[in-house]
Image (cartoon, rainbow, N blue to C red):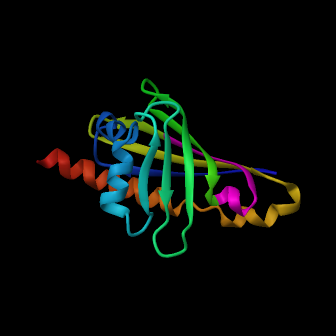
């Protein structure tokens, strides 16, 4: 079974400024700083923020839960970043594939849309697991990055 969820978040900052946060390792640094208590701690395992980089997100609390993902696509021209979970997280729950695609779309000179998409694959016998997929963490991240970039613009 394959599935996909997508969410768009409008932010009051230029697409180039938003992409500069999303494209590399700054996103992980901001997640730690702004959302560590909600999303968890981000640690770079390997790489410099380009394709092939592996990061580990340790979920908050005492559960010991984590996920590792690899950066599969980094397209500066189209402002697209795609990651794939390679260990932990949804894979431990029974998903075969779990990918996140982040697109920064220019709306006008002073605003952008962050389109976050989750695509997944799982065995047809585990279809009930699809209900575990949620856009909330990506939506929260997009909103906070938008606020951060807007605040940075004012400085």
Examine the structure image and report whether residue 86 is included in the region drawn in magenta: no
Q: Is residue 63 above or below residue 112?
A: below
> What's drawn in magenta, residue-wise?
90-102
Residue 121 in percent (x, y) is at: 75, 49
The residue lying toward the viewer, choosing from 143 and 125, is 125
For image coordinates 63% across by 57% down, the residue present is: 88
For image coordinates 42% across by 51% down, the residue present is: 43
The residue lying toward the viewer, choosing from 40 and 45, is 45
For image coordinates 28% across by 44% down, the residue present is: 13
In this view, the residue farthest toward the right is 125
Q: Is residue 53 left or right of residue 3?
A: left
In this view, the residue farthest toward the left is 155
Quadrant of the rendered image containing residue 72: top right
Residue 151 in percent (x, y) is at: 19, 52
Quadrant of the rendered image containing residue 44: top left
Q: Is residue 119 above or below residue 39?
A: above
Q: Is residue 58 left or right of residue 22?
A: right
For image coordinates 69% across by 60% down, the residue present is: 92
Q: Is residue 130 above or below residue 23?
A: below
Secondary structure that dominates the magenta span: strand
The residue lying toward the viewer, choosing from 42 and 130, is 42
């Amino acid at each position: 079974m394959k599935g996909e969820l997508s969410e768009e978040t409008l932010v009051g900052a230029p697409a180039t400024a938003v992409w500069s946060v999303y494209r590399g390792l700054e996103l992980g640094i901001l997640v730690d700083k702004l959302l560590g208590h909600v999303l968890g701690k981000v640690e770079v395992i390997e790489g410099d923020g380009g394709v092939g980089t592996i990061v580990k997100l340790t979920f908050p609390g005492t559960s010991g839960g984590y996920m590792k993902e690899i950066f599969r696509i980094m397209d500066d021209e189209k402002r697209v970043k795609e990651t794939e979970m390679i260990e932990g997280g949804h894979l431990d729950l029974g998903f075969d594939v779990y990918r996140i695609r982040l697109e920064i779309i220019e709306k006008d000179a002073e605003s952008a849309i962050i389109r976050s998409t989750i695509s997944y694959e799982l065995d047809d016998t585990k279809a009930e697991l699809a209900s575990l997929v949620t856009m909330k963490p990506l939506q929260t991240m997009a909103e906070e990055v938008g606020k951060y970039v807007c605040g940075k613009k004012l400085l």
